[in-house]
Amino acid sequence: MPSTLFANGKIFLSGVKPGINPSPTSQPTFAEAFLVEDDKIVAVGSVDKDSALHRALAMPHVDFVDLAGKTVLPGFVDGHMHLMILGHAKDLDDLDPLGRPILIDTKDLHFSWANTAAVKDMGAESWADVPGGIIERDEDGKPTGVFGEAANITYVWPYLASVASMEERKGAIKAAVKAYHQSGYTGMVDMAMDEGAWEAMLALKEEGWPDMRVACYWLVKPGRNEAENLAQVERAVELAGAYNAETGPDCRIVGIKVICDGIIDACTAGLSEPYAHDGTGCNPLWTKEELEPVVKRADEAGLQIALHAIGDATVTMVLDALEKYASPARRPRVEHIELTSEADAERLGRLGITASIQPVHADPAILKAWPRLLGEHRCKRAFAYREFADGGAPLALGSDSPTAPHCPLGNVYVGTTRKSFRQPEITTTVNEHFALGLCEAMAGATQGAAYSCFDEHRVGRLAEGCKADFVVVDMVWDKDRLMEAKIEQTWFDGRKVWEKK
């Protein structure tokens, strides 16, 4: 059994349990060394004081790695991303404008634009309107090529998956894994799994699963009636029964995802007051009557539930549904939670609901339109992470990649400083009083994301018995210097899968 002693480093011991969040100024705890046997960590501590680590120094079969003062963090787990879309995003450099089909997604993936040739190729002329969807039509009722929200999810996403060959889909997953290794990730939580992507994942599993731990939430799209909605839940139940932590913990279906509203920049997030710039309102994509049966059935079947809610009215609706029908023991979660009332921020922790947050979306470089759209008074309630943490909500940090950069250290930087990662020269901050502490943000990006899908016993921590998934980082433990930090190595199952050249 191969064994390696890693010593002379700063081994981050989070000491942060999900839902029991420290103060923003809590100081980290570091060990000096750890011992890896095969794919697991078997000891963590000091070479001078820990007998197991001290004895390992003298064992001829134990390899020795001098960390030279570098910091070791648990392998990052992206708590919210889109695996297949990330992989395909790397193939969009060769668009041909000469009369060929062109489809362009917004960076947030909520809208897309198609030229006439693409509308024809997709068969969009026959697409019926769907609840919560936008299909822009001309005076004759023909699609103009603008598709938004539920229409984008229901029609455009599946079409893109269907035209990609199996080899292209498998290649997209491999490309995403490679990119994530370079950023220090060893785990992902996919938030929009569907038939096309899952088929490719199963094909890869047959060939040999890549070095990544992936938990998937099955996307439930708005149907025309309750029966259609529940049929999608039953498909998730079927898949979760076959692909779970017991049958294959690194490639599994854990629950369902429902996109309950849009985004503020497109004025499709559900708000309790009209948008400030034009006085128009926007309701959630799902009504209470549509959402509750889905939540109820999913929880009864033992599935986890993830609900996308960005606007404050939508947040209230989804918390009501989860409080009424979801068991806290299943670790339900709300995604994004960008605009909340103080009362709803408190409810998250009280109800045991995971706050699945993407600090990179709070980057001031991309929020320049918010004061005009929301008004200054509502902007003061944006991204209230400090209230979530203080209220006892478990935190799971994610990137929402590819809608935003997936660099985990950049994500933590925005979450702790509320400054811009995209444009560091910007001096603006976004509600700095809602910032997280560095310890709790790092824990949320590792242990918290693992906890969100019941994997914290294996990954997300550097502790005895955990998987040897970790990253070696050249960094100073200071939130204001995270932009200088460099990922040096990524290790998965005790094997080095990426190293900086």
Image: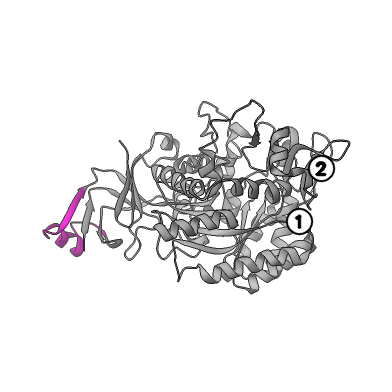
> Identity of the amino acid at label 2?
Pro
Closer to the camera, 152 or 366? 152
Q: Does the magenta segment cover residue 477?
A: no
Percent of width and height locating residue 218: 60, 60
Q: Residue at x 46, y 63 (%)?
A: 455
Q: Tags 2 and 1 in contact by the CB under 8 Å rule?
A: no
Quadrant (top left/top right/bottom left/bottom right) for the C terminus = top left
* Alpha carbon separation for disc pair 2 and 1: 18 Å
How many numbered badges does the structure rendering display? 2
On residue 442, the disc is none
Residue range (magenta): 44-65
Relative depth, front residue between 336 and 286: 286
Outermost residue toward the bottom in this view: 300
Residue with the mark numbered 1: 286
Q: Quadrant of the N terminus?
A: bottom left
Q: How is the image coloured?
A: one colour
Asked whether residue 262 appears in the rendered view, the answer is yes
Given residues 226 and 15, the one toward you in this image is: 226
- Horizontal side, residue 322 vs residue 46: left or right: right
| Residue 166 % position (x, y) | 51, 50
* Residue 355 higher or lower than 156, as above or below: below
Say what amino acid the circle numbered 1 marks. Answer: Trp
Instruction: Determine if residue 394 is in view.
Output: no
- Residue at the (73%, 41%) spot, across then down: 147
The circle on residue 274 is: 2
Going by the image, does 130 lie left or right of 483?
right
User: Is 86 on the left-hand or right-hand side of 30?
Assistant: right
Q: In x, y percent, where is residue 124?
A: 74, 43
Q: Along the line of sight, which residue is nearer the eye, 135 or 142?
A: 142
The extreme right residue here reads 139
Which element type, helix, strand or loop, lies under badge 2?
loop
